[in-house]
Image: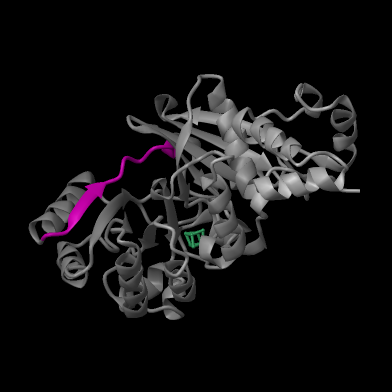
Amino acid sequence: MDKKPLLGLSIEELEDLMRSRGMAGFRGRQLARWIYLRRVEDFSSMTDLPTKLRDELPEDHSVTGVRRLGTWVGSGGAATKHLVGLSDGAAVEAVVMRYSYGSSICLSTQVGCAYACPFCASGAEGLVRDLTVEEILGQWFIAQRHLDERNERISRLVYMGSGEPLANYDAVLRSMRLFHSEEGPGIGYRRMTLSTVGVVPGIEKLSAEGIPITLAVSLHAPNDYLRDRLVPANRSYPLGEVLDAASKYAADTGRRLTFEYAMIKGVNDHPDLARELAILLADIPCHVNLIPFNAVDGCEWIPSDPERIEEFEAILGRMGIGATVRRPLGHDIEGACGQLKRRHGEV
Ligand code: SF4
């Protein structure tokens, strides 16, 4: 019988679980401390729990349902990628990036992805399945344990790994609430970013949740003609609808939007497109991240020249749109989503 992981349960659920086993509810709070704050996986080490409970819990439960299959460190220690094995033999990646202001983890939300962006390794395999909430939390658990050795803490979450987070809405939302909870990792909503390809119904639903996370939209083009080619989801959710939903999100939450724009040489990096983008975004509170394209195997596109990216950024700036070129961490460990898993195969 599969053991039910405890990671992914709220404090109330842990307390209920303890009561159902004939224990006092406060034992659930003790368990939460061992799991979320101390990241202990071995029940026998949870020394303030009764011996009987420590002996019996492993019969029905594990702490996590995931395991670390490998860890690669690149970019001079600034990027670390973990390959995370799931209970059914599938695997996903979680990338930790160290910045001057702290560490951030890029989380996967699905095995594969249905949206088939032509430049993405995750999209190439199609959607395999959604991740469960404990599998999303499990990526953090593995990465944070690795950082524990250096006494460092993950302080930001970015839902930008393999999969479309809004296509796995309930598990993603629940994971955010757990990450935010006082008895859990205690990561503020303002330190969470959800990146979407532009799934309009999901953006609309998120607007009503009342949680002020940052919404990042993968734009990559300033018009439907070009975006249809780069982001196939645009045929279902055209640019105008995506921007309307995103603008409403910004108005409802008071959060400035982020637009991601991968710079692809000769495809979407012409100065005229920068001007078109600036006009398109003129009335939206936003920031644009220009990302040097991260080429994946089998893709003919290559990154824009640095001078072209600088010119694009300057045009946006002159036209009143804040933009930065995102530091391309992780290229040396195959930082584009899905690449590492693809290289190492299903484990
Ligand atoms: S870029 Fe994102 S939305 Fe597109 S296929 Fe990859 S994981 Fe899916």
Q: In terms of depth relative to the viewer, which is nearer, 300 or 83?
A: 83
Residue 172 picture quarter: bottom right
Mark yes or no: residue 63 visible: no
Quick one: which residue is furthest to the left in this view?
318
Q: How many marks?
A: 0
**332 versus 163 height, above or below:** above
Q: In terms of depth relative to the viewer, which is nearer, 48 or 204?
A: 48
Residue plotted at (38% across, 57% down): 301
> Where's residue 30, x and y in %?
70, 33
> Where's residue 227, x and y in %?
35, 72
In screen coordinates, is 94 left or right of 315? right
Residue plotted at (73% across, 30% down): 41
Mark yes or no: residue 206 visible: yes
Q: In terms of depth relative to the viewer, which is nearer, 326 or 20?
A: 20
Residue plotted at (36% across, 79% down): 241
Q: How is the image coloured?
A: one colour
Q: Please report the bounds of the magenta region as a residue range.
A: 320-331
In screen coordinates, is 100 left or right of 172? left
**263 versus 267 height, above or below:** above
> Where's residue 133, x and y in %?
65, 53
Residue 75 picture quarter: top left
In screen coordinates, is 337 left or right of 300? right
Residue 33 magenta-highlighted: no
Residue plotted at (59% across, 56% down): 174
Quick one: which residue is furthest to the top in this view?
150
Q: In terms of depth relative to the viewer, which is nearer, 185 or 305?
A: 185
**271 versus 328 height, above or below:** below
In screen coordinates, is 107 left or right of 222? right
> Where's residue 335, x and y in %?
47, 42
In the picture, the quarter occupied by the C terminus is: top right
Residue 329 magenta-highlighted: yes
